Image (spheres, rainbow, N blue to C red):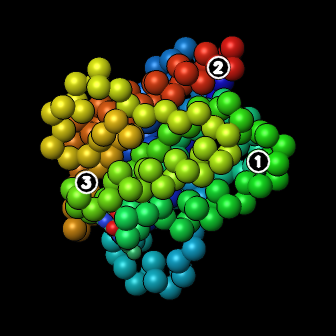
Amino acid sequence: MKLLIVYYSTFGNVYKMARLVAEGASEVKGVEPVLRTVVELMPESLIESRPDMKAGKQMQRDVPLVTLEDFKEAGAIAFGTPTRFGNVSAQLKNQIDQLSSLWLKGEFEGKPAGVFVSTASLHGGQETTIYTLMASLLHLGMIVVGVPYSVQELFTTAGGGSPYGPGHIAGQDNLRAVDKEEAAICRVFGRRLARIGKQLSNA
Ligand SMILES: Cc1cc2nc3c(=O)[nH]c(=O)nc-3n(C[C@H](O)[C@H](O)[C@H](O)COP(=O)(O)O)c2cc1C
């Protein structure tokens, strides 16, 4: 079974989370994590003018763009996004808005999916972002997956991560590393989605 991890990241934080989600998924026998990103919507000139954005993009230069085939083949999907004014990034939403042909065929129905997120600040909108994106997942017919409280790190995290999904606090300069608890929650989430996807697809 393929677990598609499709994300958008400007400075590299969500990319790092995506890799941790993939790490967790790969622990499940018979599951292949597929890491994909989406089309950038910011002008190249803006990225070129910002060394921090350039470095973030450079980090992910080898990640392929997601295709409709990737969505079709996936038995489970993890969506990763940075928060933009308490909401989903336009880049990821733009990709979701191009899924109607598959949606009309019911391709997403019954597939498990979840959301992971990065914000600059602790109360910057992790939960609103995840919740907002969950509405789209429900419209697509997907089964929403979060993180249960049997995951001890949910009690101890001083950064991101909640029952709604993995989270990371990147800080105002976007340089705060994904910490131990945040990383553990990303891995558990990947593993959980992989297991549920496998069960549901009888893979
Ligand atoms: C236009 C814009 C809006 C943002 N809005 C928020 C916000 O509402 N709350 C917050 O905590 N961080 C906000 N941020 C910070 C981003 O969430 C942060 O840069 C991101 O989590 C880093 O992830 P990345 O390294 O994968 O790009 C915003 C950043 C930009 C550029």
- Quarter of the image where the C terminus is located: top right
**Marks 2 and 3, how far apart at CA:** 32 Å
In this rendering, would 103 be left or right of 50? right
x, y percent for residue 169: 25, 54
| Residue position for label 1 | 103
Residue at 38%, 31% (x, y): give it. 147
* Numbered circle sitting on residue 43: none
Decide if residue 62 is on the left or right side of residue 172.
right
- Of mark 2 and mark 1, the one earlier in the sequence is 1
Where is mark 2, residue-wise? 200
Residue 58: x %, y % from top left: 45, 63
Whichever of callouts 2 and 3 sits on the residue coming sooner in the sequence is 3
Residue placed at 43% from the left, 34% from the top? 146
CB at disc 3 and ligand 1 closer than 8 Å: yes
Q: Nearer the viewer, mark 2 or mark 3?
A: 2
Q: Which label was assigned to residue 169?
A: 3
Q: Position of residue 170 (x, y in %)?
A: 26, 57
Q: Name the residue type under label 3.
A: Ile
| Image quadrant where residue 138 sits | top right
| Residue 173 locus on image (x, y percent) | 23, 68
